[in-house]
Image: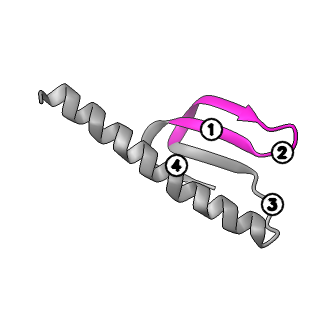
Amino acid sequence: MDTATQIFAFLVTVLVLVSIHEAGHMVVARALGIKVLRYSIGFGKALWKRKSKKSGVEYVIAMIPLGGYV
């Protein structure tokens, strides 16, 4: 594998793990009756975002893909 492929594979792996981890936080928060305002993968400026009309949750993919938050 060349370096570019390894970096890409690392980023995809981190994004998948972070999204699963944060989804767990969101499921528990909703089960406990806590309102979730934002589900974000990455930090910094939003590259893509969408607000759910049904739940009011804002889903975000941000610029720095090394974490996330709910």
> Type of residue at label 1?
Val
Work out whether 17 lies above or below 35.
above
Calculate the distance from the C-alpha at mark 4 to the C-alpha at mark 1: 11 Å
Disc 3 crowd, CA 10 A, few/some/many (<14, 14-19, 20+): few
Q: Position of residue 4 (x, y in %)?
A: 20, 26
Q: Which residues are magenta?
A: 43-62
Q: Position of residue 35 (x, y in %)?
A: 80, 60
Calculate the distance from the C-alpha at mark 1 to the C-alpha at mark 2: 13 Å
* Rendered image coloring scheme: one colour
- Magenta run includes residue 38: no
* Residue at x-position 70% and y-position 48%: 38
**Which residue in the structure is indicated by mark 4?**
19
Calculate the distance from the C-alpha at mark 2 to the C-alpha at mark 3: 9 Å
Tag 2 and tag 4, C-beta contact below 8 Å = no
**Which residue in the structure is indicated by mark 1?**
60
**Which residue in the structure is indicated by mark 2?**
56
- The label on residue 11 is none
Disc 4 secondary structure class = helix
Work out whether 18 lies above or below 11.
below
Tag 1 and tag 3, C-beta contact below 8 Å = no
